[in-house]
Amino acid sequence: MIAINTLPETRKALFVEWITTFLPAELSIAQPLNLQPLAGDAGFRRYFRVPCQPSLIAVDSPPERENNPAYVAVAMAFQRKGIVTPTIVAVDFAQGFLLLEDFGTRLLHAELCSGDEAQTARRYDQADAALRTIQQVAARADVFPSYDAPRLQAEMALFADWFVAELLGLTLDDRERRLCQDLFDVLIDSALEQPQVVVHRDYHSRNLMVRADDSLGVIDFQDAVVGPMTYDLVSLYKDCYLRLPASQVAARALNYKKLQSDLVGTTDDSLFLRWFDLMGLQRHIKVLGIFARLSLRDGKSAYLHDLPLVIRYTLEAAQRYPEGQAFYDWFSARILPILPQQPWYRDWTTAGDSL
């Protein structure tokens, strides 16, 4: 958690002055302004609760680091379709400051971990409904970039660069790089052969919030793209922060397929599950690299705690398909033996079994 006092003095003064200036007139607030720091995300944004009634969220989002115009453009596109995202009260693109509606503190993650099966099913139904609406958003090229082969490839390159090399200290030889690339090519082909829709790109239990009226609000959507229809679905049901039993994952994935029958057409269940699993494999290979980078480059070491579950997802999916077997065998022989030396490591085979 980042306190307001950790901001450089000049930026802190500008931030506080800007918030005070752009607070709606009807929201009186005591001075000096006392901002409550909130937990951050995987980006460079810093969040603060403004103690007015109703409260607002002030965001320090450095323009040299974050694409704030994209955030606003995606928010407007989502809101026009009826997707619940924070209302933008004020924005300053030049300075990188935003004032947003406050969705409160109830992350979907906590409710899914409550042990209440009926509540969990209902919340996943709500998340499915919101996702279906996202996939109906007009795929405007000026708002949503294409999740194309170079972008998919660049994401998976983070695995070798950050997880293998920087975190584990290993160097891949040409044969190992070719082995990985052979799998990456399969994953890219599978992603691109799917129906292409608007993709949130980080649609999971920590980016969905339960609002006061019991509806779900969607946050952290600024990286949305046009891409494979199973990407957000597998992000939700093979969540990097919690695990559902595999049988439930498959059942919910196929139920979603039925709900989106107009989109998938005559695609059979086995092909849809292959799309779903291989899309998850692409995402989790990427996430291994991203979580390592977040720790090593950005000082966010808490993400390392979630690596064992991501490893489990990765190996389970790789082993399930013939095209992934060589990668599974290589990872098992080259990577797994050195993982117990890592301070974050715990048994990947049971990661996520207890919430």
Image: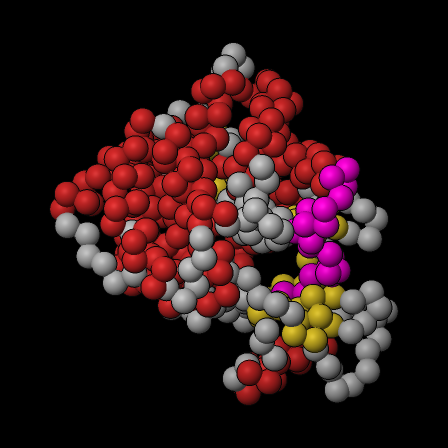
User: Left of 139 or right of it: where is 88?
Assistant: right
Q: Which residue is at 45% across, 42% downward?
A: 313
Report the span colored magenta.
97-119
Is 102 included in the stretch rendered in magenta?
A: yes
Q: Which residue is at 60% across, 26% downward?
A: 251
Q: Where does residue 219 sit, x and y in percent of width and height?
A: 63, 52
User: Left of 52 or right of it: where is 76?
Assistant: left
Which residue reaches farthest left? 174
Q: Is residue 189 above or below residue 158?
A: above
Q: Is residue 31 above or below residue 133?
A: below
Which residue reaches farthest top? 266
Q: Where does residue 146 sit, x and y in percent of width and height?
A: 42, 38
User: Left of 254 or right of it: where is 290?
Assistant: left
65, 318: nearer the viewer: 318
Q: Where does residue 120 sit, x and y in percent of width and height?
A: 72, 41
Q: Quadrant of the N terminus?
A: bottom right
177, 347: nearer the viewer: 347
Q: Is residue 254 above or below residue 108?
A: above
